[in-house]
Amino acid sequence: MVTIDLSKQSITEANELIRQCGERGEDVEVLNPDARHHIGVGLTQGIKVRVRGSAGYFCAGLTDGPHFEIDSNVGWGLADNMYQGSVVVGGNAGAIAGVAIRGAEVVVKGNVGSRAGQVMKAGTLCCAGNANFMAGYMMYGGRIIILGNSGEKVGEDMAAGEIFVGGDVQSLGSDASQVAPTAEDLKGIKEFLDKYGLKFNGTFKKIVNAGTKLRYKNPEPPRRNIPFFTFSGTTDYWNEKVQEDIYVKSQMGRYRIRGYGAARPLPHLTDIAFKRDLSQAGRDPDLLKRIKMRTTLGDKHGAKPLDLSMPVMIAPMSFGALSRSAKLALAIASRMSGIAENTGEGGMMDQQRAEADQLIFQCLAGRLGWNVHDMQRANGLEIYISQGAKPGLGGQLMAKKVTKELAAIRGIPEGIDLRSPSRHPDVLGADDLVIKVEEFREATGHRIPVSIKLGAGRVRDDIKIALKDTFDYVELDGLQGSTGAAGAEVLEHVGIPTLAAIQEALDALDEIGAAGQLPIVLMGGIKDGVDAAKALALGASAVAVGTSAIIAGGCIACMQCHIGNCVVGIATQDPEHEKRYNTPIEAVHIHHFLEAMRWQLAAITDGLGYSDVKQLSRDDLVATTPEAAKITGLPYAPEYRDPNLQLKAS
Amino acid sequence: MCGIAGIMYKTPGGGDTGKDLIDMLDGCQHRGPDSTGFALYGAGHDGELLLRFMIVTDDGGTASIDAIRKILGDYNCEILDEETEGGNYRVRVRFTGDLQKFAYALEHGATVISIGSSLEIIKDIGGAHDVDDVYHVARHTGTHGLGHVRLATESDVKPEAAHPFWATGFSDVAIVHNGQITNYWKMRRRLERKGFEFRTDNDSELIAVYLAEKMSHGVALKDALRDSIDDLDGTFSFLVSTKDEIGYAKDRLAVKPMVLYETDDMIAVASEEVSLNRLFPGKALNTMEPAPGTYNTWSRSTYPNNQ
Ligand SMILES: Cc1cc2nc3c(=O)[nH]c(=O)nc-3n(C[C@H](O)[C@H](O)[C@H](O)COP(=O)(O)O)c2cc1C
């Protein structure tokens, strides 16, 4: 047994030591914990860890296998995301005990705070005392046993799983119902209680999902939708898109869900131009050899940065919205072009990890597919707060896409219309976000960058919070950003345009004297290297592409993404549809597109007389519309407007 | 976007308010690295007021201090002692009269930090130890006090925006607050119509004035806190203090944490247990987390042997 004294050692040193003990198979005793946060985070071996006192937030978080015993109390987020193993707490636990567990056995001998077992997927959370409100909030599976009383709204929006309450139930949550426990249930509970030496003589009430909200009542009507490009091109009041919209709503009686982004005219990068005539740029065949484009991202706090061959990345897109084959094509293309791929929501696949040289692992509020092993083999971690297509809202993944395989990775029931939560259980403000970031760093030994994905809404505040909460860089996504599925009204109207987003972000940093201190990766409607060059000149450190990469990889914008009927096998989980996708060929197509971006970036940089993309600056730009000038503060110069565009407008 | 702390001693002489609050705030500085503040209650004297101001120090503070002295003169204050410390001017005066009028006059001509017979607020940018280095917070002993660490999102972090806030116009009332009041403007307009003034757009100042207004009509602090849970919308976890009381209120969603620890000698409250543990290193504390939607108060006068 190894003894670690937290009055003498920092928590980071202690966690490193605990992990080393794990590798040697030695048990650990932690002295003087004094309610410090992150004790034991990131441990993946089956050793015993005895904490002599109280622990703070995220004790035993992001672990798989160990057995923790804490003598006294614990703070928020006990056993966060724990896979196998057990935790026994002698005292009370704060809010969200057992959050997102995926198999662990968590026992709290005292009381638990609010939202115990939020978004848990499997395992058992047992509280010998009373539970505060919303126990089992949005749980997807597993078992909660409360021997005492339970507060309001037990099982609020639970999708699956079972909650047993020995005392009083103050009230049931929405979509929860009370049923009689079976003999088998009671036998299982008794075995569990015996195992942990807990006594209980009363009777249990059982609470399960009532099944009223798991599926949308009215499915999307079968209809050949209008391709995105057809309906997004015009501004008339009564166009094909409007007509279709009305038709679809008249069938369903609810809001529409669709893929892609905003389809209305917005000020964009197209409305700014380079001051120089670049028509002769790019004649030099050795261009790519001369122009420096290599970009590193994420070493602000000592981590090993991403090393990009050019300031471009693949935008995070979920395995779920996209098929396995499409995700693999993106991973391969990212490697071929020397840039980074991002898992998006829904977990990491082995093949994807193998194919992508640099892979960012994204953590969303539902913690669907999130786990410590994939964190530790990622090249970067990212907390998703929101995305441009639907800032402030959760995601949608309709039933057809929630297949057996997908449900297993995510830890959720098969075949539900998945509406993933909009809020992280443990991020309710900048003050706890910083504790979350630290948890990620502890789980990965501070070795890899931690970024934040923000949909453009309240950018000015969000960027400052991102800086102060020690993120390494920001992925900022404007209103034009696409999605696999979102409410149509939200897609069109919620958020601010990409151009406004980058400007607000830069202004915010300027305001607090932090210009240049937080790299920003801009996305949302970046369609080529020209847009990328403009974004960089405005002040972004890199750009990310979603839609354009998908189109390069074969998307025909048939608008079936949300239903999962993608005809080319990209945005689907249907094996019949996916068969049509030729991953190696499409990977090369995406790679070609990325190389075209590279060439454009190089040509523009060269044409402006520079040798490094980092030299691009605002001084190279003008605004060609009054709106763009107002948003960016660039000089208004209508004479630079693209004559072809002018013709179209008149 | 912050961390809060509060302490009240049950013992006759009080305790090391400054030192204890510094420890507690240092323990949760991760919740707010930008500014730190303290509301410290010492022994007061009837008829005397302790005033603290922020001054412009470019000229050694002369202009600011002259302006303050003039108002003090207008209101027939007798200056008992005065000093400058960091960017602050601290003055003890003898004053009788309408305190609210006097306070508003001072607010219009100077940057008031606190007014009270026993309350002193010290706040500035930086961490708990940075503020202590300038203002010698650790030297303060007393009966009770509050503390606050803050993460700021405004243009530049100004000491005025640091917490605690005093209830503008009311002596000896201070507040520290974690959260966000979403019906801020509605509540503020309501109070403004009654003639109250606001120094900042900060929702913490609103809570302080809201509670102080109730107390000025003879409503007990505890009842005012009960009402606040119904009247205020949003997420909040706040601590309020008066000359001899400390109280808390917590919204019904319990989004903002608060942990409490009581011994025979003291009561301590903080956002996180790690702050409480700073006062008792190496000891597992039998803490308690106030339930959502609850409030409570402690009063010095209820501890029998504290006189
Ligand atoms: C099919 C699809 C799935 C997406 N899934 C995610 C996701 O899981 N996480 C995320 O942060 N953004 C997601 N996004 C948004 C993209 O990361 C990105 O913000 C957006 O695509 C950028 O705009 P663009 O498509 O115009 O390049 C998704 C987008 C698409 C098209």
Image (cartoon, coloured by chain):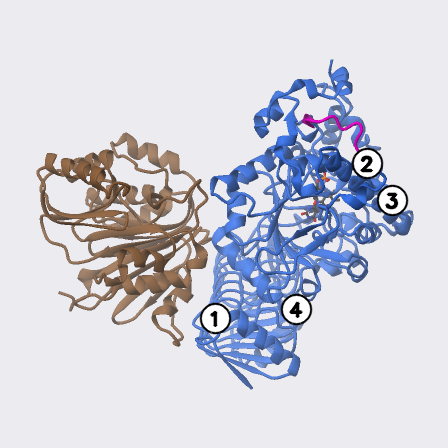
Residue drawn 74% across and 34% down? A530
**Nearer the observer, disc 4 or disc 2?**
2
Element type at marker 4?
loop
Q: Which residue is mark 3?
A: A589
Q: Which tint is chain A?
A: blue
Q: Earlier in the sequence, mark 4 or mark 2?
A: 4
List the single residue furthest toward the top.
A650
Spatial separation of the CA atoms under disc 1 and disc 3:
52 Å
Q: Is residue A6 above or below residue A242?
A: below
Which of the image's four quarters has the C terminus of chain B?
A: bottom left
Q: Amino acid at mark 3?
A: His
**Nearer the observer, disc 3 or disc 4?**
3
Q: Earlier in the sequence, mark 3 or mark 2?
A: 2
Q: In the rendering, which numbered label is found on residue A83?
A: 4
Q: In the rendering, which numbered label is found on residue A55?
A: 1
> Could you tell whether A203 is left or right of A257 in the image?
left
Element type at marker 1?
loop
Spatial separation of the CA atoms under disc 4 and disc 2:
39 Å
